[in-house]
Image (cartoon, grey):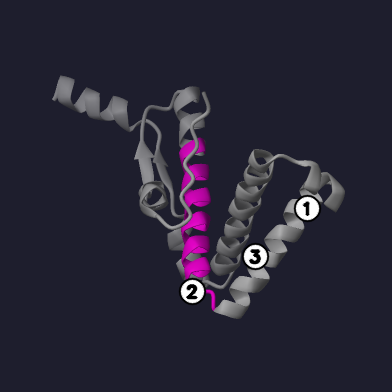
Amino acid sequence: MKVTISCIFSNDLYLIPHQVAGMLSDHATDQRKLAILVEQLKIECDRRVRGKRAYARLGAADLRVFMLKGLENSIKRAGSYEAWEALSAEQRHAIGEQVQADAIMELGQKEFEQLSDEEKGFATLFIWAGCGMHKDLNAFRYG
């Protein structure tokens, strides 16, 4: 069973990783990989949150262009207009959701690129302290 988080108008679930600034773990390879994945999740959620906020600010004309571009991209993903028409409603919906998610991420990336270098630094800040667990444990144990 595949579980997806898909909510265009609610930023709540994406705000948590979006605000993470680092993690503390040991220096083992699996923990290093986990830190990299958490950092990637933070960046993805940051772009998604920025994209959703930009989407919410679109005016009527820009929203129309956004939707038409989404429909055009959906048809391109299907291969052609005839292929799009041949798809079931569920298949169209799945393609439409993915195209919309991609468009939101694109909006978020554009918003991010407009930030100053200092703001970009804060938005991407992620600090991994990789041996903190052992030092903390040793300090407690040997006091």
Residue named by callout 3: 67
Mark 2 is on which residue type? Arg
Mark 3 is on which residue type? Met
Q: Is residue 57 magenta?
A: yes
Q: Secondary structure at mark 3?
A: helix
Q: Earlier in the sequence, mark 2 or mark 3?
A: 2
Tell me the mark number nearer the camera, choosing from 2 and 3.
3
Q: Is residue 25 left or right of residue 34?
A: left
Which of these two is toward me, 73 or 141? 73
Which residue appears at 43% of the width and 27% of the height? 27
Which residue appears at 61% of the width and 54% of the height? 100
Which of these two is toward me, 100 or 81? 81
Mark 1 is on which residue type? Ile
Q: Earlier in the sequence, mark 3 or mark 1?
A: 3
Q: Is residue 26 above or below residue 67?
A: above
Tell me the mark number nearer the camera, choosing from 1 and 2.
1
Q: Quadrant of residue 59?
A: bottom right
Image x and y of residue 80, in percent: 86, 50
Q: CA distance from mark 3 to mark 1?
A: 12 Å
Residue sitting at the far left: 143
Q: Which residues are magenta?
A: 37-59
Residue named by callout 1: 75
Image x and y of residue 126, in percent: 43, 49
Q: Earlier in the sequence, mark 1 or mark 2?
A: 2
Q: CA distance from mark 2 to mark 3?
A: 14 Å
Which residue appears at 47% of the width and 31% of the height? 34
Q: Secondary structure at mark 1?
A: helix
Which residue appears at 53% of the width and 49% of the height? 44
Q: Is residue 93 above or below residue 55?
A: above
Residue named by callout 2: 57
